[in-house]
Image (cartoon, rainbow, N blue to C red):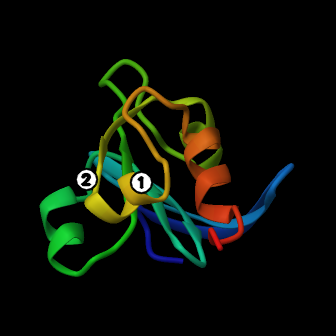
Amino acid sequence: MIPGLSADQHVVRISQGEAVAAQYAWEGGQYCALHTPRGIVGCGIYDVACADVFDIALAIARGTPEHPLRTGEDLLDAKIVGVSRRADQLGIRVGMTGREAVACLLAPPAA
């Protein structure tokens, strides 16, 4: 372990399947994400414009200084505030919860 730095990855289960939660914290900051085979639900540190360049399905949830997003589980109840084009194509919309966005990413591809 590195003093002042924490890192964790673990599986989060929702009714539609599983995602890998990744969370990192250091003195003065943190970030987290939920990774699925089709894309990511992440905190505000991620960049939708970059995801669009690489055609990545990305949904952004944003915490506040009073209620930061620290864990993958925190993302589940957070509201989505931004989506990449690929995420939009998968049905993810601004205003959804992170749980709803993960469910979209875990849904079988449309025929």
Looking at the image, residue 48 sits to the left or right of residue 20; the answer is left
Query: Among all residues in the image, which is located at the extreme front?
Result: 111
Number of numbered discs = 2
Amino acid carrying mark 2 in the image: Ile
Relative height, residue 41 to residue 8 (above, below): above
At 60% from the left and 68% from the top, the residue drawn is 8
Q: From the viewer's perspective, is residue 54 above or below residue 32?
A: below
Q: Are marks 1 and 2 in contact (CB under 8 Å)?
A: yes
- Residue on which disc 1 sits: 42
Give x and y (percent) for residue 61. Answer: 39, 39
Q: Quadrant of the N terminus?
A: bottom right
Q: Going by the image, does 52 lie left or right of 57?
A: left
**Secondary structure beneath label 1:** strand
The answer, for residue 32, to whether it is visible in the render is yes
SS type, badge 2: loop
Task: Locate residue 22, reporting x and y percent.
Answer: 55, 66
Name of the residue lying farthest toward the top: 66
Residue 25: image quadrant is bottom left
Q: Residues within 10 Å of mark 1 (few under 14, many from 20)?
A: many
Tell me what residue is drawn at x 15 percent, y 69 percent.
50
Tell me the quarter of the picture where residue 26 sits. Answer: bottom left
The structure residue drawn at horizontal position 67% and vertical position 51%, both measured from the top left corner, is: 103
Judging depth in this view, the residue of 30 and 72 nearest the camera is 72
Residue highlighted by disc 2: 45
Q: Is residue 25 visible?
A: no
Quadrant (top left, top right, bottom left, bottom right) of the C terminus: bottom right
Q: Position of residue 64 (x, y in %)?
A: 32, 24
The residues bearing labels 1 and 2 have C-alpha atoms spaced at a distance of 8 Å
Depicted 30 relative to depicted 86: above or below: above
Neighbour tally class for label 2: few under 14, some 14-19, many 20 plus, Cα within 10 Å: few
Q: Residue at x 37, y 33 (%)?
A: 94
